[in-house]
Image (cartoon, rainbow, N blue to C red):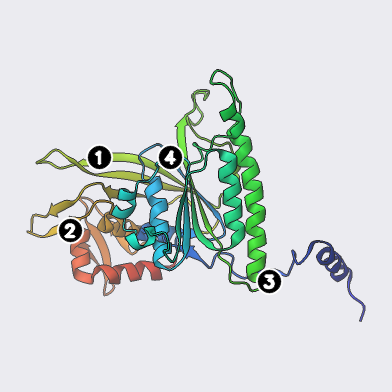
């Protein structure tokens, strides 16, 4: 039987370029694999966590928990038995004490640990980019955190004198990196699907800083992220994180936590424009309620109750009311609870998390 014209074209393409084109059903679900963010609310709105085989950008002003979110993804991947890499271009973006505080076990910090947790401090942007591409091509890394784009200084700029201006050098570097990275990820996906090789599709997490745009006109955005527009275009997920407020103990006047507001600006794997708040404890703290109940929080830990409340409201399982009250559907009727603590006490934390995971996002 003679082949149709489209079959002949496909045969010619595959003969020349390899198995790069196939029926849509062959590819199945592109995003079947995720790495948990460590937050129930973010896992829900992202469809499971940071998507593997795709690029995620965490950007915003300094001190907004961007690096900590990346380290939480590394912690969850390590606990699942996967290798991870943290590329530190800020020469100290994460200290060992903070890495231990957020829950990364000391056994992963040993030289002969399995799985492997690697930390790199490259000297310039090109070195970091080439290392990044080699790690992706290896197919052995589950999470790669690139911290940060703002600190990825091109070698050309480092070799120049301080009084010499270098225009858009970082933007050109990131544009080249994104083009090569997209190609490397596509080749890795091809190996995994066609050749059935046991390769890891890495969750690529780029941390980026946001600065004031000094050339902005009044009706435009007064803030701009560094590195040009390439990262914005190639990212499947863009999460903007802004520092909101400090939590101060009323008695000791010490800062024990800080809150940040996150907004899902872009998402190719879920619905965008969700928003919420995360509260990170920077010191051990005991919270006492009027009813005599107490809740203990450790340094480096997110407020799980606040996070669960946001997840319940985002999934429409709970309805927010004034004064922190929540309406929850129980036996077909809405029951009003005076705070998330009462709801957790009635149902149990794990049971509520299970309900959020079972809720339909789309």
Q: CA distance from mark 3 to mark 2?
A: 54 Å
**N-terminal-most mark, 2 or 1:** 1
Q: CA distance from mark 3 to mark 4?
A: 40 Å
As measured in the structure, the alpha-carbon distance from the residue carrying label 4 to the one carrying label 2 is 46 Å
Q: Please say if the residues under marks 3 and 2 sit with CB atoms less than 8 Å apart.
A: no
**Foreground tag (3 vs 2):** 3
SS state under label 4: loop
Q: Which mark is residue 338?
A: 2
Label of residue 194 in the image: 3
Q: Classify residue 7 as left or right of residue 268.
A: right
Residue extending farthest to the top is 163
Q: Residue at x 63, y 62 (%)?
A: 188
Disc 4: CA contacts within 10 A as few (<14), some (14-19) or many (>=20): some
Q: Position of residue 48 (x, y in %)?
A: 45, 63
Closer to viewer: mark 3 or mark 4: 4
Name the spot of residue 273 as percent of width and height, x first.
46, 49
Marker disc for residue 246 = 1
Residue closest to the eye, 19 or 125? 125
Name the residue that disc number 4 marks.
91
Report whether 332 appears left or right of 269: left
Looking at the picture, how far across and down is residue 61, in whole percent? 40, 36
Give the alpha-carbon distance from disc 1 to disc 3, as whole Å. 51 Å
**First in residue order: circle 3 vs circle 2:** 3
């Amino acid at each position: 039987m003679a082949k149709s014209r489209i079959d002949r074209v496909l045969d010619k393409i595959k003969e020349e370029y390899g198995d790069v084109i196939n029926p849509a059903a062959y590819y199945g679900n592109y995003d079947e694999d995720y790495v948990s963010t460590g937050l129930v609310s973010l896992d829900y709105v992202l469809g499971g966590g940071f998507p593997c085989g795709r690029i995620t950008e965490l950007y915003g002003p300094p001190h907004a928990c961007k690096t900590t979110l990346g380290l939480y993804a590394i912690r969850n991947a390590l606990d699942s038995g996967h290798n991870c890499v943290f590329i530190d271009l800020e020469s100290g973006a994460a200290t060992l004490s903070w890495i231990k505080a957020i829950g990364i076990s000391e056994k992963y910090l040993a030289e002969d640990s399995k799985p492997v947790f690697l930390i790199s401090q490259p000297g310039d942007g090109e070195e970091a980019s080439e290392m990044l591409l080699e790690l992706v091509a290896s197919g052995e890394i589950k999470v790669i955190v690139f911290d940060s784009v703002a600190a990825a200084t091109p070698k050309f700029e480092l070799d120049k004198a301080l009084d010499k201006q270098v225009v858009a050098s970082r933007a050109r570097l990131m544009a080249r990196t994104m083009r090569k990275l997209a190609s490397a990820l596509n080749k890795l996906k091809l190996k995994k699907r066609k050749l059935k090789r046991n390769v890891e599709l890495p969750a690529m997490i780029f941390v980026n800083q946001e600065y004031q745009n000094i050339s902005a006109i009044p009706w435009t955005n007064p803030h701009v992220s560094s590195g040009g527009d390439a990262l914005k275009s190639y990212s499947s997920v863009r999460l903007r994180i802004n520092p909101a407020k400090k939590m101060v103990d009323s008695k000791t006047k010490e800062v024990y936590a800080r809150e940040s507001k996150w907004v899902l600006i872009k998402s190719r794997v879920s619905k965008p424009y969700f928003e919420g708040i995360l509260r990170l404890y920077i010191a051990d703290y005991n919270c006492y309620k009027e009813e005599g109940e107490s809740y203990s929080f450790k340094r480096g830990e997110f407020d799980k109750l606040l996070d669960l409340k946001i997840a319940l409201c985002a999934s429409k399982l709970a309805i927010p009311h004034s004064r922190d009250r929540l309406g929850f559907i129980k036996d077909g009727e809405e029951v009003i609870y005076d705070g998330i603590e009462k709801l957790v006490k009635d149902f149990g934390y794990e049971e509520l998390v299970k309900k959020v995971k079972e809720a339909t996002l789309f």
